[in-house]
Amino acid sequence: AQRVTQPEKLLSVFKGAPVELKCNYSYSGSPELFWYVQYSRQRLQLLLRHISRESIKGFTADLNKGETSFHLKKPFAQEEDSAMYYCALSGRGTGGYNKLIFGAGTRLAVHP
Amino acid sequence: KAGVTQTPRYLIKTRGQQVTLSCSPISGHRSVSWYQQTPGQGLQFLFEYFSETQRNKGNFPGRFSGRQFSNSRSEMNVSTLELGDSALYLCASSLDSGGRGEQYFGPGTRLTVT
């Protein structure tokens, strides 16, 4: 089965603390994974994808195939990081083409 | 470039009615995907259209249908509305395959069924 699990609905941290948003996936094959973010009153947008291996707004995510995880990390949280974060997997659809499968999302709240 | 637009932004319907939502993708994008977003279920994939053809379909009943026009604009239709259909409906466009590349999301249509 193709599935994305984000175990935490809410993650609450103080400004300057490290952040780790957990994402686990289930997929037979070579996975393509993404993190999308939705800030308050803004549209859902791509934050980063694993194949680009870049750091965006201080966030990084490493694909761990052994643990089937793609956790999102940031060493020092900022108040502007408060948002809803979705992990997504590019999985095979019924039509034979790939589709994005999203996790349930984790709300990150960064307190001053 | 103008972003993805969705109309209408808000809609209130009664059980048993039908509704049509519209999505205009970014110019040049050929793929349009639709999602249902609810607090309990998160983002659930409805279907994807590419060059007027449905490529993928999610696990939704046949009351949910869609189509894409030659200018890549897409519509989704829900017939015989149920209370459980109340949700935010998002569409997203991408240059090529929606499942492989970056998707650009619209603001959504908030559907309330009473």
Image: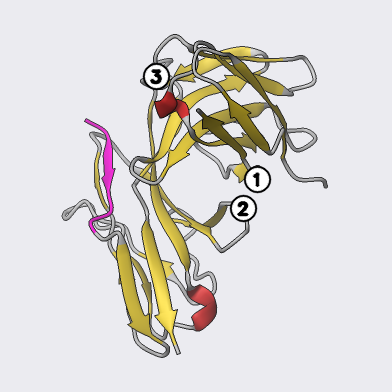
Protein chain holding label 1: B
Q: Is residue B99 visible?
A: no
Residue B27 sits in which quadrant?
Answer: top right
Which residue occupies 27% across, 33% down? A2
Check disc 2 and give the amino acid type. Arg
Please give the residue where the numbered disc 1 appears in the rendered image: B107
- Which residue is identified by label 3? B60
Q: Nearer the viewer, residue A91 or A81?
A: A81
How much space separates mark 1 and mark 2, taking CA atoms?
Answer: 6 Å
Q: Are marks 1 and 2 in contact (CB under 8 Å)?
A: yes
Residue B66 location, quadrant: top right
- B106 is within the stretch colored magenta: no
**Label 1: how many Cα within 10 Å (few below 14, some 14–19, many 20+):** many
Q: Residue at x 67, y 13 (%)?
A: B52
* Residue A56 visible in this rendered orientation of the protein: yes
Q: Is residue A112 left or right of residue B25?
A: left
Looking at the image, is mark 1 or mark 3 earlier in the sequence? 3
Mark 2: which secondary structure? loop
Q: Looking at the image, do the residues carrying marks 1 and 3 touch, with CB atoms under 8 Å apart?
A: no
So how many labels did they put on this image?
A: 3
- Which type of secondary structure does the marked residue at label 3 adopt? loop
What's the residue type where badge 1 is placed?
Pro
Residue type beneath disc 3: Phe
Provide residue B68's location: percent of width, then percent of height: 68, 16
Relative height, residue A88 to residue B89 (above, below)? below
Badge number at residue B12: none
Parent chain of label 2? A
Q: Which residue is mark 2?
A: A43
Q: Work out which quarter of the rendered image holds the N terminus of chain A and state it.
A: top left
Q: Residue A60: image x %, image y %?
A: 42, 69
- Read off the chain for label 3: B
Magenta residues (range): A1-7
